Image: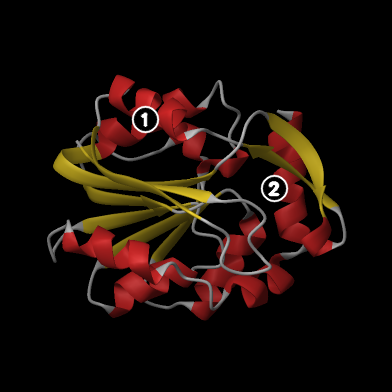
Amino acid sequence: MREYKITIESYDKTVQEYAKNVGKLHPYKESKIFLSLINKNSLILDLGCGSGRDSKIFADKGYKVIGIDLSRKMIETAKKLVKNVDFRIMDMMKLDFKKESLGAIWANAAFCHIRKKDISKVIKKCYKILKKNGVFYLSLKEGQGELLIPDERYSGVGKFWSFFKKNEIERILKGCGFKIIKIYINKPKNSYATHPWISMFCRK
């Protein structure tokens, strides 16, 4: 799909700059809530792990973590920066995990690049691979529509973005079988954030 191909190529081109820019932007508030909802022995999937920032924080706290991303260079960089995580190149549209094999899924800013018509398919796959009572965290950019636009933070490379309203994603999550534990909207906290973020904590 053209939109996805362009987006992945853009991340491959800017991987070093991206890793530097997001290195100190881990969402500590959200990860604290996330970890409070799961067992210490839970296997965490960091879906759309990028350069491994969040994976490292979870692994350093003693959790077993698998990080996946479709950008080959992101995964290469993550492997160099983080040594205690199992990183894999994988398409979130084709999650290659056994049914009910994961304790928790962390999808921070991962679905922002998925077409709106595809998001239910991916969320259903997440539901399938989570264990009973497994926890699912995702964050999305608040807004309307979807489009391929230049990312001016990275010299205008093209990226596909999808935007959601709170009630819209709530309806999708419930339709896929998830129970919503907590949902709220964060206003931009720094110049790097271009939109408000919807944060959602769910349980299977």
Residue in front for this viewpoint, 144 or 173:
144
Instruction: Write the residue at 47% across / 70% down.
Output: 26
Residue where numbered disc 1 is placed: 170
Quadrant of the image occupied by residue 180 = top left
Position of the N terminus by quadrant: top right
Compared with 80, 66 (above or below) is: above
Tag in front: 1 or 2? 1
Q: Are marks 1 and 2 in contact (CB under 8 Å)?
A: no
Secondary structure under tag 1 reads: helix
Q: Residue 146, image x and y in percent?
A: 68, 31
Identify which residue, 77 or 35, lies in the foreground.
35
Above or below, 31 relative to 118:
below
Three-letter code, disc 2: Ile
Instruction: Give percent across and percent down for residue 168.
Output: 45, 26
Q: Amino acid at mark 1?
A: Glu
The residue that mark 2 highlights is 8
Q: Residue at x 22, y 75 (%)?
A: 62
